Image (cartoon, helix red, strand yellow):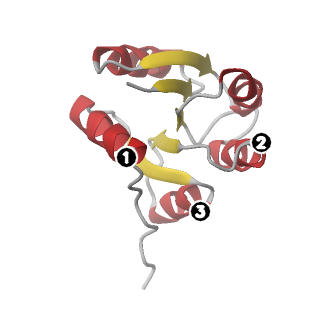
Amino acid sequence: MATIMIVDDAAFMRAILSHMLRELGHEVVAEASGGEEALQLYSQKKPDLVTMDITMPDMDGITAMHKIRLLDPGAKFIVCSAMSHQQVVIDAIAAGAKDFIAKPLQKERVQSTIQRVLSGVSVKAPKLF
């Protein structure tokens, strides 16, 4: 299926998502606990897709996505975050996220989102008015 890098500061979330992705037939090529580590690993592994948390201590997910897109404008991101306020979703989509999954993660939602993103379909930022 796809090579995927997981970026989340919570080790238990990385473990849950990694297990879920492997069950769905994907290869988890890297796990990062923060934005800085994600930048280094992305340039080494060049995954097909990155799952990105928003709130992390060293560098937030929005900043990390911007920096990774400077390295690879074609990078594909799915944001997986408990922060699902409308403005956060808009910021994530503007930073290059192809979709947004609110935590807690559900296997069916993860699967359908990955299929949609890999097929080239992405969500549009919600309208404010």
Residue 84 sits above or below residue 28 on the image = below
Q: Residue at x 71, y 43 (%)?
A: 72
Q: Secondary structure at mark 2?
A: helix
Q: Which residue is mark 1?
A: 119
At mark 1, the secondary structure is loop
* Picture mark count: 3
Element class at badge 3 = helix
Residue furthest out toward the bottom: 129
Please name the amino acid that badge 2 sits on.
Leu
Q: Quadrant of residue 110?
A: top left
Left or right side of 39 for 119: left
Q: Which residue is mark 3?
A: 94
Distance of label 3 from label 2 (alpha carbons): 17 Å
Q: Is residue 81 toward the left or the right of residue 47 in the image?
A: left
Residue under the image location 64 percent in, 22 percent down: 33
60 and 32: which is toward the camera? 32
Crowding at dot 1, Cα within 10 Å, few <14 / some 14-19 / many 20+, comes out as few
Circle 1: residue type: Ser
Dividing the picture into quadrants, the one containing residue 10 is top right
Q: Quarter holding the C terminus?
A: bottom left
User: Above or below — where is 24 with respect to 108?
Assistant: above
Q: Earlier in the sequence, mark 3 or mark 2?
A: 2
Q: Position of residue 31 (x, y in %)?
A: 58, 18
Q: Amino acid at mark 3?
A: Ala
- Residue 31, numbered label: none
Q: Nearer the viewer, residue 90 or 71?
A: 71
First of labels 3, 1 by sequence position: 3
Q: Nearer the viewer, mark 3 or mark 1?
A: 1
Residue behind mark 2: 71
